[in-house]
Image (cartoon, grey):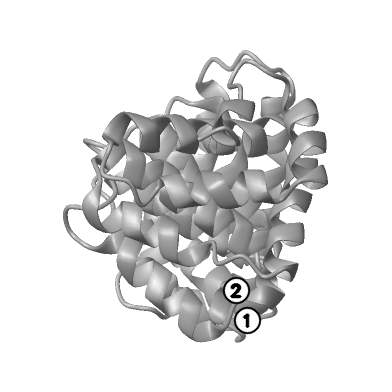
Amino acid sequence: ASLLKLLDAGEPALKLKTMIMGNCDILRAALGALSAQEGKVTQWVLVVLYDMLREDCSCFAIWSRALQQPIDIKTPLLSVMQRADTFSADKAAWILCAVMGHHSSFFSDQDVKEVVEAVQRQGACSDLGALEAIVNLLKTASRRALIWKLPGVADRVVSIDLQGASSQYLYRCIFALWMLSFEPEGAIFFKEEEVIVKIRDIIKASSSEKVVRLALTVLRNFLTHKVFAEQVVELGVLEVVQALEYEKWRDSDMYDDIRDMSSQISLKVQEMSNFDR
């Protein structure tokens, strides 16, 4: 209890990081407190740990130090997802998957499978919480193919209801595809038509500059993949992108991005038309 009192949510992340780096027993005590049945204590500990990582990414060094000792961080955070309220489950999933994404060498493929299953278990995390956790795991390039083929992952990213999805949820879906779009062609199994249809429909439906801009970047990356490029041409993505130029965007650079994307797709259309002839 005395060690937990040192975790002051009002202190800057850098100060808390320095303190914990000097005494890993503070983090050990915080993780131990997560096994308590007291919901408010659990929420308080999770918020402090979550806010530290969001405020200052150098705080991931704390978790590296803990894993080297080693301190078991997976078990207490998984236990929160299995028994706690949705708020706590979301925070625990985000923390665990962010740490696993940054320090992947400390975790096995089986650990990843176990955590992905846990975050998607009904009654654990919210839909957004589960998606954000999976996105954190996808930051490990060497495990993207493994994670993408696990049950529920691809559907969670691609098979979304645009009518009820928030801009935040759409952005996370596109962010996941953005990371995957850097993988070499053929490295990951995609249902290319389904992916392009979803990107096209998000561009058409979303009024968020942040979402549309990233979606255009994903399209640009996927155009280098032959099968994706064919789907972009065949599914009428060019008309949807061209229509964006008539929308009102706060950032004038958006119009340059739209025209550039239209030009690149037009070239693909021309290439395929010439090939057909």
Q: Residue at x 53, y 44 (%)?
A: 30
- Can you give x and y, in whole percent of width and height, for residue 146 in the image? 51, 82
Tags 2 and 1 touching, CB below 8 Å? yes
- Please name the amino acid that badge 1 sits on: Phe
Helix, strand, or loop for circle 2?
helix
Position of residue 207 relative to residue 136, above or below, is above
Quadrant where the image shows the C terminus = bottom right
Question: What label sits on residue 272 in the rendered view?
Answer: 2
The quarter of the displayed image where residue 20 is located = top right
Position of residue 113 relative to residue 138, above or below, is below
- Can you give x and y, in whole percent of width and height, for residue 32 in the image? 47, 51
Position of residue 57 relative to residue 122, above or below, is above
- Please name the amino acid that badge 2 sits on: Met
Residue pushed farthest front? 2
Is residue 277 something that shows in the picture?
Answer: no
How many C-alpha atoms fall within 10 Å of the one at disc 1: few (<14), some, or many (≥20)?
few
Residue pushed farthest left? 123
- Can you give x and y, in whole percent of width and height, for residue 118 in the image? 32, 66
Helix, strand, or loop for circle 1?
helix
Q: Which residue is mark 1?
A: 275
In-front residue for pair 229/135: 135
191 displayed left or right of 64: left
In-front residue for pair 117/45: 45
Label 2 and label 1: CA atoms lie apart by 5 Å
Q: Residue at x 42, y 80 (%)?
A: 149
- Can you give x and y, in whole percent of width and height, for residue 8 in the image? 61, 22
